[in-house]
């Protein structure tokens, strides 16, 4: 299948010369369904059968790897485990720890915020294990989108993809706004000094942040120029950041007062878990490292070291920082905008607040840079499947980076950062992230226990049954937690059911696939626990976040039914015909043109 959206001319040597920059209809809707209004009307009529096809269709590892050819040029393999560790820390250590620690300690957890970081850190680490196995075996830029497409099918992958993109845009916007707050404290102003209030806009969206927009633009330019260059800039900035973190810990403990740790958990257990759900924001970003698998020299070695190593280091530093902050100030007096800077000011070390603010800015710059690199690669791989316009998948021959995807995602981030407050962004971000991480853990169980053509129907049915019980019991636990303030009887029912379902999966269903290079240990226990914890943390989020999540998911469904479904369907069928790989996808093909169907799952 040729590269869409690029003018092709035959040169003097008989080769094909491609025009790098093009912007025509075929760049966005080149598929057969959009060639004419008649074709589009016919495609809409076929929506039910095409939807069934895409729901049942599971991609193969080989197809995800082959899809790299749709980007005109390959991304350059320049990264090692050393780069990935620094990318991982650079992606994660930023606005979460420097802002949300103060916010959640002040309003939800008190000094017990350190336990909130432990809970969210364990959940994130379980997800890291699941991501790592996929990234090693399917080293492409699509990250969790590619993994879900292989194991749970096109439709689930698209819903997840939309939330992945939302996750990155929101994360970048939140960090950009926090960058402005710490920049203000660095100049000895109040943290909201540079915000422009517009009374005519709705509350929560009426404090404009033009500096955040400027930061997003600069980061976009850096991300476009070079991945290796971005990596070097990132680990230089992260090294400086780590030194500042150690400064905060050492000097903060010098000015500590153990009396500030009393009471330790003023909001009790519920406050700890409610804070941990929001603080999951502080761990968002490590999945960006998995999107760089396509640019990694030795994925089997480098990705496990990079992902797991950066997460362990990050969790350890987070806990130390949380302990330090709550020892410096009573939790009631912690500033919710720039907590560490204000904490040093409150103990009489005014000069230290400038070091803290500068370090925070360095850290958040790294987070923005890695986020810009990661989100562009997600969009690149999604558009390779034509679920999004293929124009986004083009990789620049000179820089080896996806320029179009980087620019568009950065613009979206800048627009959100201009209008939206941090508390709204952090809750919505957490719900999208927890949802995706839960799906990746579920996909890993499917990958280990189901192989098309090898797993018997009986084992497949047992697998489906146990997975549904694990999901149902986890949802029941989270629901009970959200509705019952002091009850405990429900947990005596839901938790044993989850345990028995996991034991049943472990004992009665044989694993159908063994990892080739690196595998998650303790399967099915580890991914099953990841599912349960992620869903439980979802139950700790507020109702408004679920409403916003529902609105966004509804928008995704509308787009998919009218555009993404038909574009990806045409692309998949053309790919099958063009290569002769009739079984390149697993799933029952439904086609009005009598295309040979594949085998059902």
Image (tube, rainbow, N blue to C red):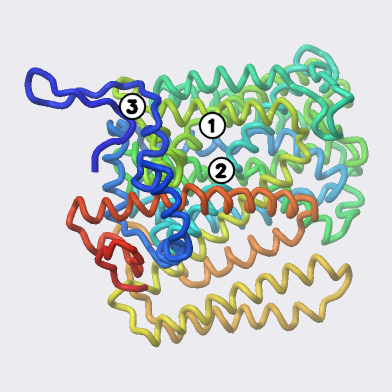
Q: In this view, does 216 lie to the left or right of 590?
A: right
Comparing 283 with 19, the one in front is 19
Residue placed under numbered mark 2 in the picture: 313
Q: Is residue 392 left or right of residue 359?
A: left
Q: Earlier in the sequence, mark 1 or mark 2?
A: 2
Disc 1 to disc 2, C-alpha distance: 29 Å
Q: How far from the left and from the top, in percent, is residue 385?
A: 38, 47
Measured along the vertical axis of the image, is residue 225 above or below residue 252? Answer: above
Helix, strand or loop at label 3? It is loop
Comparing 473 with 236, the one in front is 473
Quadrant of residue 107 within the rendered picture: top right
**Callout 1 crowding tier (Cα within 10 Å): few <14, some 14–19, many ≥20:** many
Measured along the vertical axis of the image, is residue 552 above or below residue 451? Answer: above
- State the residue lying farthest toward the front: 38
Tell me the quadrant of the picture where the N terminus can be found.
Answer: top left
Comparing 141 with 381, the one in front is 381
Measured along the vertical axis of the image, is residue 320 above or below residue 63? Answer: above
Helix, strand or loop at label 1? It is helix
Comparing 519 with 490, the one in front is 490
Task: Tell me what residue is drawn at x 63 percent, y 60 percent.
Answer: 534
Residue placed under numbered mark 1 in the picture: 409
Q: In this view, does 230 lie to the left or right of 361?
A: left
Q: Using the image, tell me which numbered label, if any, was put on residue 400.
A: 3
Q: Closer to the camera: disc 1 or disc 3?
A: 1
- State the residue lying farthest toward the left: 13
Disc 1 to disc 3, C-alpha distance: 17 Å
């Amino acid at each position: 299948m040729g590269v869409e959206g690029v003018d092709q001319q035959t040169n003097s040597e008989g080769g094909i010369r491609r025009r790098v920059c093009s912007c025509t209809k075929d760049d966005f809707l080149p598929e057969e369904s959009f060639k004419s209004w008649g074709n589009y009307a016919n495609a809409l009529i076929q929506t039910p059968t095409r939807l069934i096809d895409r729901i049942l269709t599971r991609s193969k590892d080989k197809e995800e790897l082959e899809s790299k050819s749709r980007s005109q040029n390959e991304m350059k393999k320049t990264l090692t485990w050393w780069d990935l560790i620094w990318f991982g820390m650079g992606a994660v250590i930023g606005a979460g720890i420097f802002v949300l620690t103060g916010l959640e300690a002040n309003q939800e957890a008190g000094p017990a915020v350190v336990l909130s970081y432990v809970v969210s850190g364990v959940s994130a680490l379980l997800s890291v294990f699941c991501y790592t196995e996929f990234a090693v075996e399917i080293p492409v830029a699509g990250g969790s989108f590619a993994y879900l497409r292989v194991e749970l099918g096109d439709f689930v992958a698209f819903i997840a993809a939309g939330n992945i993109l939302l996750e990155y845009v929101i994360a970048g916007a939140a960090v950009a706004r926090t960058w402005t707050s710490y920049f203000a404290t660095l100049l000895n102003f109040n943290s909201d000094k540079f915000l422009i209030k517009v009374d005519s806009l709705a509350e929560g969206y009426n404090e404009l942040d033009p500096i955040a927009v400027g930061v997003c633009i600069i980061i976009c330019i850096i991300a476009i120029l070079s991945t290796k260059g971005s990596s070097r800039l990132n680990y230089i900035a992260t090294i400086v950041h780590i030194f500042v973190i150690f400064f905060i810990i050492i000097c903060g403990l010098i000015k500590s007062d153990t009396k500030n740790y009393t009471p330790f958990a003023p909001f009790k257990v519920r406050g700890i878990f409610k804070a941990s759900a929001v603080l999951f924001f502080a761990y968002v970003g490590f999945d960006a490292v998995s999107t760089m698998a396509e640019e990694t020299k030795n994925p089997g070695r480098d990705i496990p070291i990079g992902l797991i190593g950066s997460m362990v280091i990050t969790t350890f530093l987070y806990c130390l920082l949380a302990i330090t902050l709550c020892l410096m100030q009573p939790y009631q007096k912690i500033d919710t905008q720039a907590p560490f800077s204000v904490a040093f000011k409150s103990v009489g070390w005014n000069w230290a607040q400038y070091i803290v603010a500068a370090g925070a800015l360095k850290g958040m710059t790294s987070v923005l840079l890695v986020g810009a690199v990661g989100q562009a690669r997600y969009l690149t791989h999604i558009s390779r499947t034509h679920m999004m316009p293929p124009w986004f998948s083009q990789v620049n021959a000179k820089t080896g980076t996806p320029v179009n995807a980087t620019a568009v995602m950065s613009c979206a981030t800048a627009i959100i950062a201009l209008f939206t407050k941090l508390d709204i962004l952090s809750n919505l971000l957490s719900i999208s992230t927890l949802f995706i991480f839960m799906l990746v853990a579920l996909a890993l169980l499917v990958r280990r226990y189901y192989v098309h053509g090898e797993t018997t129907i009986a084992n497949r049915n047992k697998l489906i049954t146990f997975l549904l019980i694990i999901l149902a019991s986890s949802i029941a636990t989270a629901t009970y937690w959200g509705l019952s303030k002091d009850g405990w009887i429900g947990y005596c029912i839901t938790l044993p059911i989850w345990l028995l379902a996991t034991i049943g999966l472990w004992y009665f269903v044989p694993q159908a696939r063994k990892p080739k290079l690196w595998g998650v240990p303790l399967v099915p226990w580890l991914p099953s626990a990841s599912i349960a914890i992620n869903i439980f943390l979802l139950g700790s989020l507020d109702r408004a976040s679920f409403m916003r999540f529902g609105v966004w998911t509804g928008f995704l469904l509308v787009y998919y039914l009218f555009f993404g479904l038909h574009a990806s369907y045409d692309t998949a069928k053309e790919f099958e015909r063009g290569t002769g790989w009739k079984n390149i996808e697993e799933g029952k093909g439904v086609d009005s043109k009598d295309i040979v169907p594949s085998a059902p799952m």
